Amino acid sequence: MYVRSKYLVITLDYLFPIFICFGVIALGYFALYSSFFQIKTVICTLDYEACLDPSVLAELNKLKGENIFTLSGDRLTQRLTSGDFTIRQATLKKELPGKVILDLQSVYPVAALAMPGDPTWIILDQNHRVIGTRSSDPNVPTVIVPGPLTLAVGKPLSDDLLIQSIQLARNLANELFTIKSITLVDADTIKLTLSDGVIAIFTPKKDLSEQLRSLQLILRDATITQGIKTIDVRFIRPVLR
């Protein structure tokens, strides 16, 4: 006859699964809630150089203190490429215990600013925000400005004169004009040097599209422009000389 013992006999066969369960729970808790796996370092490169955009740096600084396992890479990259920043592509890499590496690519430039004697170009996106600088010709419509500029990466242009000049440069490119340079001379004058050496003079204080149409009409008639060096479209009746 079998008699049930009133004592619980604990053997290794029972203890081993219990230890495994407690170990998994402890490891999970440690991984998710321990400061050991909090993000402490964020390394960011933009176009293979260190990130300088204050708005991007501020966004990435929010990551510090988050758990590296719960950080959603997809959500972060979608945020960075949402249009609020001048970024078209973002790649995220995690390195344990607490490092995040981001490789960012800027949106494509549509225009640029340059200064005489300065070998760098300030490149802009379609919303006139500063993407950064380039040491080689970005091959986009470029406006040459006379003096030093105080601009911030990621921020849009605030000077109406600069914005008008950039818009004129882009319109000229869209109209397939072949120009050598566009120079913002002063608050009253924008000078275009065409491919044949002819200089066209605009004013930002009048409708630029009307002045552009006047220039187009004049250039269509070769007999009018023969021997002409300057076309001044700032007036109702353009002046040719």
Image (cartoon, helix red, strand yellow):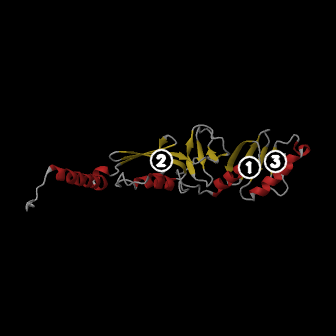
Compute the Cα span from label 3 to label 1: 20 Å
Q: Residues within 10 Å of mark 1 (few under 14, many from 20)?
A: few
Identify which residue, 234 or 123, lies in the foreground: 123
Judged left or right of residue 54, residue 138 is right
Query: SS for tag 3?
Result: strand
* Picture residue at 59% right of the left edge, 55% below the top: 157
Three-letter amino acid code at the position of disc 3: Ile
Compute the Cα span from label 2 to label 1: 31 Å
Three-letter amino acid code at the position of disc 2: Leu
Nearer the observer: mark 2 or 3; the answer is 2
Query: SS for tag 1?
Result: helix
Nearer the observer: mark 3 or 1; the answer is 1
Nearer the observer: mark 2 or 1; the answer is 1
Q: Which comes before the other along the chain, label 3 or label 1? A: 1
Q: Using the rendered image of the protein, determine whether residue 145 is visible from the camera's viewpoint.
A: no
The dot on residue 231 is 3
Name the residue at the front extreme: 1
Q: Using the rendered image of the protein, determine whether residue 11 is visible from the camera's viewpoint.
A: yes
* Residue of label 1: 174
Compute the Cα span from label 2 to label 3: 42 Å
On-image quarter of the N terminus: bottom left
* Residue of label 2: 52
* 84 over 122 or under it: above or below: below
Residue 234 on image: x %, y %: 78, 54
* Picture residue at 29% right of the left edge, 56% below the top: 33
Q: Residues within 10 Å of mark 2 (few under 14, many from 20)?
A: some
Q: Do the residues bearing badges 2 and 1 touch, measured as CB atoms within 8 Å? A: no
Q: Which comes before the other along the chain, label 2 or label 3? A: 2
Judged left or right of residue 56, residue 28 is left
